[in-house]
Amino acid sequence: MRHFEYKNGEYYCEDVPLSTIAKEVGTPFYCYSHATLSRHYDVFDKAFETIPHLICFAVKANSNLSVLKIFSKLGGGADIVSGGELFRALKAGMEPGKIVFAGVGKKKDEIKSALEAGILMFNVESSQELLAIDTVAAELGVKAKVALRVNPNVDPQTHPYISTGLKENKFGINYDSAFEEYRQASALDNIEVVGAHMHIGSQITQITPFVDALDKTLALVRGLENEGINIQYIDVGGGLGITYNDEAPPHPKELAEAIAPLLKDSGRTIIFEPGRVIAGNAGALVTSVMYTKINEGKTFYIVDAAMNDLARPSLYGSYQGIVPLDEDTTSRKKVSADVVGPICESGDFLAKDRILPVLKQGEMIAVMSAGAYGFTMSSNYNSRPRVPEILVNGSQFNIIRERETYDDLVRGETVPDYLK
């Protein structure tokens, strides 16, 4: 369930008309529903209540401190991939012992910060990374807890850019060499092997890939146990998809019914790393129509949001629903139109060949399912300030990130004396 709907002819987030927010902060802006974020977390958590588990929200999906704080207060942890995400997770009150650190390119200063914070474990992606963690741990006089991310070579049947579990992907350690990698890890003085990790991709809409990957991971864990390598945590990653258009992804309960029986008697804690499935449909990007343009019979709605604000359509060709804020608009004549932004790129679009009502200058639309990989992937391309983020809770709303200013665009830049 998402708490976005028409009420009295206006489009609301929970009990607040999006037009009311627009009057205060202008457009474009991101808006998130506290109720949806909380409910999606609870649904995922309860789906797996029959097995010991930890939910580590994928910070890359939505890293706003207030959003992370919601999950922290609900008892969740964080799946991070950088020192910056570690900083954010800790700043939001996440318990260090509920943080897992993934990513193929961990820098030594990031490893050091994570060890000093006392995170739960590193998800190690390569032999050289493992040695780097061992070196930093030795310098600090501690043991680093690790899981090895094993690539199960399972096709997640998703967009190739967000597929991560095939042998041609950059992620993880080859399944066939995993035993030897684990032996080497166990022999290192400053490494404590505690887990096994898999993650096959994002926006997965079928259960079979999860089951296939988990079967291979469990077979590996049983083999390691026979060699005296004890695995305390099985990290099954994230990647469960959401409905953007006509997809029919499994409900978390369906996923639990498929994989919980495989894990129930494992005697280990299972770690999940959901991101999109919790945050995706909890947010929208609200934007205004600036101009309508017709070229050779083709209609373009030029809005004040752009590919720098929401990259997914341009990057993946992905579908994002478009909803006018004024319900009366929906009864107008329909046209096929592209919704495009002001960026100087032909790839700057939020929707292509979309059947939409005739929209007038100044009218607003909501670009839906933008709560994950929306703001976190935004940029300052074309020197455009990044937009504000708003959190709605019932009948109140708070600005949880201010709109950037032009001064923010040049913060940290200096001009050498010889150019002055």
Image: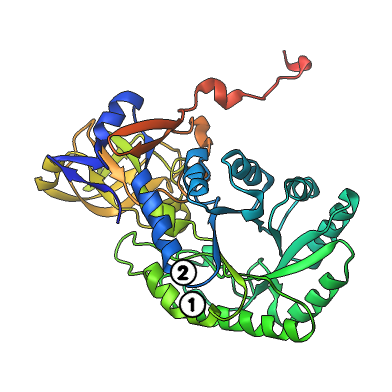
Q: Are the residues tagged 1 and 2 within 8 Å (C-beta)?
A: yes
Give the residue pinned by disc 2: 48
Colour scheme shown? rainbow
Q: Is residue 262 above or below residue 205?
A: below
- Which image quarter is the N terminus in? bottom left
Query: Can residue 291 be seen from the camera position used here?
Result: no
x, y percentage for residue 294? Answer: 24, 42
Give neighbour class at mark 1: few <14, some 14-19, many 20+ (Cα, 10 Å). some
Q: Nearer the viewer, residue 74 or 374?
A: 74
x, y percentage for residue 415? Answer: 71, 19
Give the residue drawn at x 38%, y 74%.
254
Give the residue drawn at x 26%, y 29%.
20
In this picture, residue 129 sits left or right of residue 199:
right
x, y percentage for residue 147? Answer: 71, 67
Identify the mark nearer the N-term, 1 or 2: 2
- Which image quarter is the C terminus in? top right
Give the residue pinned by disc 1: 260
Q: Amino acid at mark 1?
A: Ala
In this picture, residue 174 sits left or right of residue 395:
right
The CA distance from mark 1 to mark 2 is 7 Å
